[in-house]
Amino acid sequence: MSYVHGSLDTQCSAETHIDNEFECCMTAANEFPSLNPVSAVSCPTDGSTSNVYSDGSPKGCFTSGDVIIYNTHGVGDARPSYRPICKASSGSSGDPHLRLPHGGVADFKGENRTFFALHSAPGFSFAMLVTFTSFLLPKPLLVHGSFWTKASWVVRGNSGQQYAL
């Protein structure tokens, strides 16, 4: 596996959870001998700790100048001076909770029986149907929540024809 300094397209592993991203960061750091990992507190090589940056730095593995930083506590967005080495994970699970690319987490409600566009680009769009429901959690706790219940894609083929899936 090779790494390109500053590449957003670096693949760390099939599933880029933060533990795998740490390994990716350390492997990448070893491939960039001209760059310097920050002190053991901020970028450990044994996997025992992670840094504690929470000043708006992005989450994940990145370079700033000639320094490699692995940040598990970032809450901010990308900065022009920070160049990512490995992709950060993003996704959704549950009712729906969003895991954002730079470490943020968000809860999503939406509007009942309405498709919400999650991704839109030329020739491709992806949306999920929001459905409201009430359910009982342990304690007991009645929750009025929302779920994504259907997915919809619209894609444009090479001929220019649109297909709805």
Image (tube, rainbow, N blue to C red):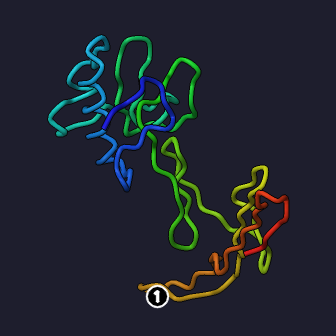
Above or below, 45 against 93 in this view is above
Q: Quadrant of residue 64?
A: top left
**Picture residue at 62% right of the left edge, 87% below the top:** 134
- Total number of numbered discs in the rendering: 1
Q: Is residue 42 left or right of residue 77?
A: left
Query: Percent x, y for residue 147?
Result: 62, 77
Numbered disc 1: secondary structure: loop
Residue 39 position, x and y percent, is 24, 19
Picture quarter with the C terminus: bottom right
Residue 77: image quadrant is top right
**Mark 1 closeness class: few <14, some 14–19, many ≥20 residues within 10 Å:** few
Foreground pick, 147 / 117? 117
Residue in the image at 56% along x and 85% along y: 142
Name which residue lies at 49% across and 38% down: 9
Residue linked to disc 1: 140
Quadrant containing the N terminus in the rendered view: top left
Instruction: Name the amino acid type tagged 1.
Output: Pro
Q: Is residue 154 above or below residue 40?
A: below
Give the residue drawn at x 37%, y 55%.
14
Quadrant of residue 62 within the rendered picture: top left
Side of 151 where 59 appears, left or right? left
